[in-house]
Amino acid sequence: MGMAELLRLERVSKRFGGIVAVDRVSLVVEEGESLGIIGPNGSGKTTLFNLINGVYTPDEGEIFFKGQDITRTPPYKRARMGIARSFQIPRPWGSLTAQENVAIGALFGARGGQLDVDEALERARDALRLVGLGGKEDAPAHSLTVVEKKLLEMARALAMEPSLLLLDEVMAGMSPRDVDRVVETIKRVKREKGIAVVALVEHLMRAVTAFAERVVVMHQGRLILEGPPEKVMKDPLLVEVYLGEPVEV
Amino acid sequence: MVFTNAVRRALRKARLTLAAYIILGVLYLAFPHYSQLIATLMFYMILAQAFNIFMGMTGYIDFGYVAFVAMGAYGMALAVESLYELGWASIIVGFLLAVALSVALASMVGAIALRLRGAYFAIATIGVNEGVRYLIEGANLVGGSEGVIIVRELRATFGRETANFIMTGLADLALLLIGITAVMITALILSTRVGYALQAIREDEDAARALGINVTRYKVMAFTISAGIGGLLGAANWALKGGYVEPAHVFNIHYTVEAIVMVMLGGPGTLLGPIIGGLFYGSMNYFLGVIKPGLQLLFLAPILLAVVVALPKGLMGYVRERVKDPRLRELLT
């Protein structure tokens, strides 16, 4: 589509002791793009997310968002700049209601400070409906099922009105019907709001092919493959990565 | 516009809590014989409310909290001691100095301790209370271990009659006003983005960060507001009412423990919780003190244990989880 660049990682590395969790990763995400990052457990996907949203600062390399250097920007500022995320293990605020959880996203996200509490609660209602949680507004978040919590996190992230949505294994453990709904929602927010979506996926290749325009494969902290999903899925290297064969890169 | 909406929401939430203070005020006038019991209850309610603004909303337990109340007591005592010739102005300056000192200490402690989490924060704050106390006693600052006595200054300026009124009726009126202020501040916090930010921090601080909440800013905000109200309480209830400030008394960790019990009992982070906790603990303390002085402490531990096991979110937390009607929920904030 020839969109403008939204996020750029330049040779970003992160080490934990002797382990290089992310190894000189360079990656560009364009505005409104849907990107799937796949890779087996321990390949560094979640660390990469934590670098993008600011939980970790990289040991090497630089990160740019909307043209600004955000390598050392704290997470809350990145959130306000338009980076929203969900967590692999859902982390809703348990004793608040579903609606309040999402309202906080609206209150402190990209439009943070402009909304009144009542307006934020109103927006939360819409976002909950969008992800299929209409009717759960008053339920305490801790009482939701795991799938509902994942959808809640998605609604919370969407309420922030981000320009980049990072979804960490949001579809793992979901029934095919829920997966379809999430894929539909991702496509819809992309189409209607122009939000770029980057989703981490370990196993659900069907979901990746359904929503991603582009796929990158991570292995041992590195990006080893990139391309349109149908092409990447057929690559013998991908099979080797998942079967644990030694890989020459 | 946004602000007036928030005030309206706050007033709706605060109806029962404000009613509690107004009823106590009426009872105080109607039954002078029990005025000191009522003043004691108000002291505990305010202590619990002030403590709740930080501990209840963020989940951080500050074991050194009483140091802020002590700072307030010193602020009032020092203002009256050095400015008593100014008459009423010295008392007004006393309240201002009380807030200034407690907020100043809170800013210093907060800037360092609020970088720590959980148990580390709790341990660091114990040191603050003991540290300030031994600094005053050891370096013989502001009266050293003897403290500051202002009864003579009050009598010299206002005469015996008025001085006695200041140390009873006026100090108690000040308590009532501080209590109402604490209610309104808490209700306002709960009705605005500040309250949501603090609750998000309490439930999951990392998630709060990822969602755009400037965690440090809101923690410092709650910490200093909580300390400032504690300072007012110390100024009114200890310096003004007692007529003296003594380090062994005002830095007693006992008060912090009482605050924890009351907040846990009533329901952390709620508006009514600290009121219920304060009323229950205050009256228990008073009557046990009448029957068998010194026995109160023996009751603290089992009560806290029972509450943590049976009602982990306190009485109001328990009630609120069972109330579904939004209007009733608002009333029972």
Image: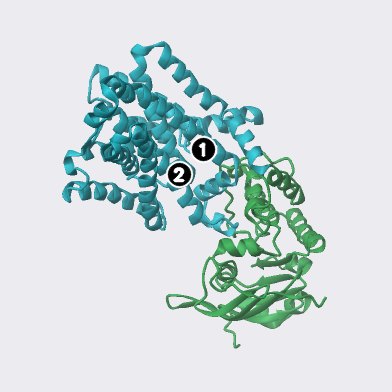
Chain colours: A green, B cyan
- The residue pinned by badge 2 equals B225
Vertical arrangement, residue A171 with respect to residue B270, above or below: below
Q: Residues within 10 Å of mark 2 (few under 14, many from 20)?
A: many
Residue B304 sits in quarter: top left
Vertical arrangement, residue B75 with respect to residue A17, above or below: above
Q: Nearer the viewer, residue A102 or A180?
A: A102
As helix, strand or loop, the secondary structure at mark 2 comes to helix
Can residue A89 be seen in this snapshot?
Answer: yes
Can residue B305 be seen in this snapshot?
Answer: no
Q: Are marks 2 and 1 on the same chain?
A: yes
Callout 1: residue from which chain?
B
In the image, is B280 to the left or to the right of A75?
left
Q: Nearer the viewer, residue B248 or B136?
A: B136
- The residue pinned by badge 1 equals B185
In the image, is A69 to the left or to the right of B72?
right
Q: Nearer the viewer, residue A36 or B6?
A: B6
Callout 2: residue from which chain?
B
In contact (CB < 8 Å): disc 2 and disc 1: yes
What type is the residue that disc 2 sits on?
Answer: Ile
Vertical arrangement, residue B199 with respect to residue B274, above or below: below
What type is the residue that disc 1 sits on?
Answer: Ile
**Residue visible at 82% across and 60% down in the picture:** A192
Residue A248 position, x and y percent, is 59, 88
Residue B151 position, x and y percent, is 24, 29
**Residue visible at 76% across and 54% down in the picture:** A177
